[in-house]
Each structure stands twice: as structure tokens, then as C-alpha cells.
Image (tube, grey):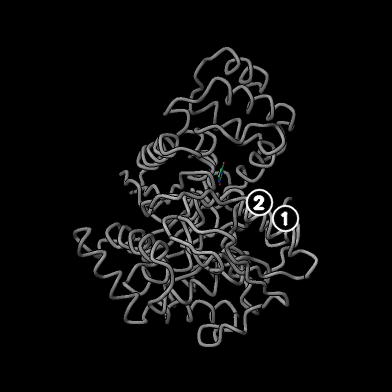
Amino acid sequence: MRAVDIIAAKRDGHAHSPAEIAWLIRGCVSGEIPDYQLSAWLMAAYLRGLDRSETAALTRAMAESGRVLDLGDLASSAVDKHSSGGVGDKTTLVATPIAAAAGVIVPKMSGRGLGFTGGTLDKLEAIPGLRVDLGVDRILAQAREVGLVIASQTADLAPADGKLYALRDVTATVDSLPLIVSSILSKKLAGGAPAFVLDVKAGHGAFMPTLARARELAQLLVDIGTECGRRVVAIISAMDQPLGWAVGNAVEVREAIETLRGGGPADLRDLAITLAGEMLQLAGRARSVAEAEQAARDALFSGRALERLGAMIRAQGGDERVLDEPDRLPTAPVQEVVRSDRNGFIAELDARQVGMTVTALGAGRERKGDPVDHRIGVVFHHKVGDRVDTGDPLFTLHLADPAQVAVARERLLAAYRWSSEPVPYPAVVLDRIG
Ligand code: URA
């Protein structure tokens, strides 16, 4: 086989055989196929598309391009969870301890924030001492002992995705459904869980800006995951406004802890219970949605989920006293309350604008490898549907430097759209596929 022939075939709209795709991915990982040929193939695949059988073959080849975790006897109770990424999305920190407390084994590989979306690893690293680079043996041992582990993707899992994703990022080929699906699922397959729950976000603050596009992505994820022998459910959830009240790393951990204590924002709690309920059903721990969600609520309101998060933090070297004393989390030296200068109903709170602002202030990274400031963020006091009067607190800025206040205030105020008429509270769970 020659790379040039594979590129030409895709350029001319022909379908690849699984053997051709496997050869391409082997050449990608070994370095025998140079980046310029891989980039040309990615662009051809972006423009011509990949059919279902090509997408499944690509997913398998990428998953098998490195080590595939063997969960052994844990596999029957193991369920992984993945979010397509959003703003204020700390759901993993709430849903996975709930699922683990209700008997699911959760061996989860998470990512870092990039662009305007946050990442679970950055949030977790706001907890003093907590480590996420665990290596395969520790991941397996902790999954057995604690039932919950959230670690960084190890370099030897799905290495083809690391290479192809970096090329996609600089060749304008990220936004392709088959390439996104194979990228996400190859990492899930390599993680070894036989089942996963996918949280596909729809809206301004998500990869998929509309419900229709999110449904398309969710359906393809479920179809290809199923074709690769896994049990997969996708929940489509709203990401037009930030999830919960907090956006930033330490402030989101604080909010996740409050939620695991039975408080916290209703949208975060509802979504976490839905996702944990799906995880329970996939693990065979509940026979119906109602039974699963009741078990998830019991795990949350009994405090068992908080206790699981504490066990995970301890096992990963973190200071679990943050659960009782959240002031041990990094705290911003500047905390400024911004008040409303108008009366009305909040009609929109643009998640993308919020995410971009908080990232630019230092809570996220513009480029891979940039440092993040865990102290930085914003906590909203009102969201879409709320009525606000002049002088009411709108949001609190958490900043490193008083010089950031004016620009942060102005950019966040620009994220609002107001109405003089009542605005309905938006639903957070929009659809379920699988
Ligand atoms: N997340 C991934 O892991 N891969 C993509 O291609 C897009 C989102």
C-alpha cells in the first residue's frame, strides 16, 4: 500500500477498506507516514466524509494503536462517562462520585480545558496535592479499591488520536463528525470500559451549536460505539448558558462539593442525577430510569457520594479537607460583586462569551501547555429566566489583579440579553439517544 493511493482514493470519493485504514493508522503511529500526507488525508476525509463502516474501522484502528486497558473482573460493573465539553461543566465531579457510591466502577480518563471550554483535570488540580498522572497500574488499583478514579489520558492509550488531533487542530479539520466520533470513541475503547454514557452538549457554549447538530453527533457516537461492541447512551444537554453558577477551576470544585452536600444549582444536580442514573442502568444496578434516578438521589443526599469523592481525592494524594473546609482551595485575592443597573428578566447568558472571558482572564488556556490560574473565575447569582432588579448582585468576579475588574465586568455584561417579559426557565436535559 502507498499513502498517496489512499489519499487519492479519498480525494475521489471512494470508500476505504478496514485494512487500508488500519495500515494508515499504523503508519501514523510508527512515523512512516509523514505529517504532510496524514494532513492531506485528513482534509480529503473532511471534505468527502467517511461512511459508517469506515468510521468504525478508524475508531477501532485508533483504539488499537496503543495499549487497551484490561479491567479484568471489574469490567462487568465499569461504566465510563464523557462530555463533549462546555462552560461551567463540572458534571463529572458530581455524577461520577454518585455513580461510584451506588456501586458502579468508574475508571475515567479526562482532558484539560482548551479554547473556551474547561477541562476536568484542571478543575481537579485546584485541589492541593491532587495528582492526575497516575499510570495504568495505579488507575487499575484505585478503580478496584475506591471504585472511582479520574486520571489524565496516559500517552500509551490511543496514541494515533494524539497525533491526528494535533494535525486536525492546525489544518482546519477538527469539525468533522466522523473524525470527532473516532477521536472520542477510540479513547473510550482504549480505556477498557464496556459501557459509556456520553453527555453531548448543544448550544452557544458547545462544539455543536444547535440541537440538530448535537443529535447527529450523539446518534453517530451511539451507532459507532455499539458497532464496536460497547453499550452506549448519549444524553443531549443544554449549553447555551453556563452550567451551574460557577465558571473557573477552584470555584467549580467548590460548587461541585456544595452539590454533593445536597445544595448547589438545580441544573447541575439534575444533569448529574440523569447521567449517574444512566451509568447505573448500564452497569446493571437498576432496571428502570425511575429506579436508577432514585438510587442516584439516595447516593447524593445520604452523603455517600461526597464520601466517595473524598476517598478518590485521598487516593490521588489530594487534601480531602477541602470537602469540609473549601477555603483550603485556591482563593482569588480580588472578589468583586457586579450589580445590575436595570430591571428585567434574563433572556440569554451567552456561555461562549463567558467561557472566552474567563479563559482570557487566566482560568483556561489558549494553547496546549499554557499554565492556568486555578483561583480565577466568575460566580453568577442569577441565570436565564430570573427576574433581576436594579442593584441586585449579578455575578462575583474572582480575579488575580484589581486591574482586571473593568474589562471582565464589561465583557461579562455583554454576554446578557434582557427581556421586559417573563422568560421560561430552560430545560437542561434535552434528549436521550441509545
Ligand atoms: N473531543 C475529542 O476528544 N476529539 C474531537 O475530535 C473533538 C472533541
Q: Which residue is mark 1?
A: 360
Whether residue 195 is visible here, answered yes or no, is: no
Percent position (x, y) of residue 278? 31, 57
Percent position (x, y) of residue 398? 66, 70
Please determine whether, in this image, residue 224 is positioned above or below residue 41.
below
Tell whether 198 sits left or right of 150: left
Residues 407 and 203: in front is 407
Badge 1: residue crowd in 10 Å (few <14, some 14–19, many ≥20): some
Ligand 1: quadrant of the figure: top right
Tell whether 91 sits left or right of 127: left
Q: Are marks 2 and 1 in contact (CB under 8 Å)?
A: yes
Position of the N terminus by quadrant = top right
Please determine whether, in this image, residue 271 is positioned above or below residue 335.
above
Q: Which residue is mark 2?
A: 356
Residue at point 67%, 77% (across, down): 330
Percent position (x, y) of residue 112? 62, 57
The answer for how far apart the CA atoms under marks 2 and 1 are is 6 Å
Please determine whether, in this image, residue 90 is positioned above or below residue 264.
above
